[in-house]
Amino acid sequence: MHYNHKVSIIMGAYNEEKNIGKCIESILKQTFSDFELIICDDCSTDSTREIIRFYANKDNRIKLIKNERNLKLAASLNKCLKYSKSKYIARMDADDICLEDRILKQVRFLDEHPEYEMVGGGARIFDGNNISELRLPKEYPSKNDVIYGPPFIHPTIMIRKDILLSLQGYDTSDRTIRGQDWDLWFRFFSKDYSAYNIQEPLIIYSETKEDLKKRTFKTSIMYYNTAINGYKLLNVPKQKYIFALKPVVFHFMPNNIKKIIRTRLNKNN
């Protein structure tokens, strides 16, 4: 099969005028250059599209596509996937920053380890003011880990394109308006695919107070339904279905307790 590039970096963007310029610049500074950056503007009402177009006019590796109506992230990523002409698919979010060797390290890993279908990695957390703790997902995640929550930091992953296509991309139902990545991981492990998390930061991951406000009771129910759907797919024993309630329970915890739990989880990982 002929590929125009080794990697397609896919990104959805909605009203990210404050962040997307820095994000794109961090991608253009990558030490690995054989990539295309495909960005789907999801009907932004600010200057996001103009900023993307500015960079696209400067670098022909950047492709801007747009939705005619707001379709949310999963559908936007699937649209990017249709335009991809690369062997590997890398994810990126418009409010995050790529560390300069991120793409190089992941390409080398997948090239050298054909037994793995996907590779993720760690992240430094940006809270809106400071770059704080290091978050490292489990090095060798498995179907047993996905039961308890997403075992990858979504914008760090790089996956073989043929594998993502075999999984039919991202689910676009109402259930996956949030948590579309967790749904994908359930389907990924149901096929007995293997993945690895590089044990160092690959991106600076934005997790501000505004981001945390998006995690509403309604989204916690989405996560619950995705968990139940995934448990059925993996034939999880009924006694473990109680773990599907984790997002709902977490939603009702005081913010200071949530912060302590996140910090301890990061340290444990």
Image (cartoon, rainbow, N blue to C red):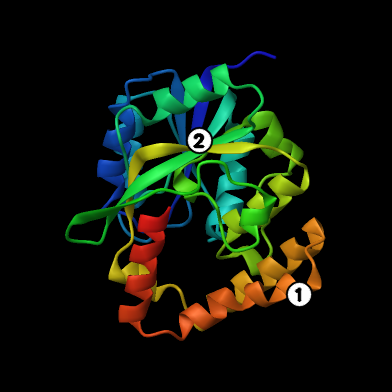
On screen, 103 above or below 264? above
- Residue 111 position in % (x across, y down): 56, 18
Disc sitting over residue 90 in the figure: 2
User: Count the marks: how many?
Assistant: 2
Q: Residues within 10 Å of mark 1 (few under 14, many from 20)?
A: few
Residue 200: x and y in percent read 36, 38
Viewer-proximal residue among 5 and 110: 110
Q: Amino acid at mark 2?
A: Ala
Instruction: Point out the frontmost of discs 1 and 2.
Output: 1
**Earlier-in-chain disc, 1 versus 2:** 2
Camera-side residue of 27 and 209:
209
Q: Horizontally, is 40 left or right of 143 in the view?
A: left
**To which residue does mark 1 refer?**
239
The N terminus appears in which quarter of the rendering? top right
Amino acid identity at mark 1: Gln
Q: Residue at x 39, y 71 (%)?
A: 261
Q: Is residue 254 above or below residue 199?
A: below
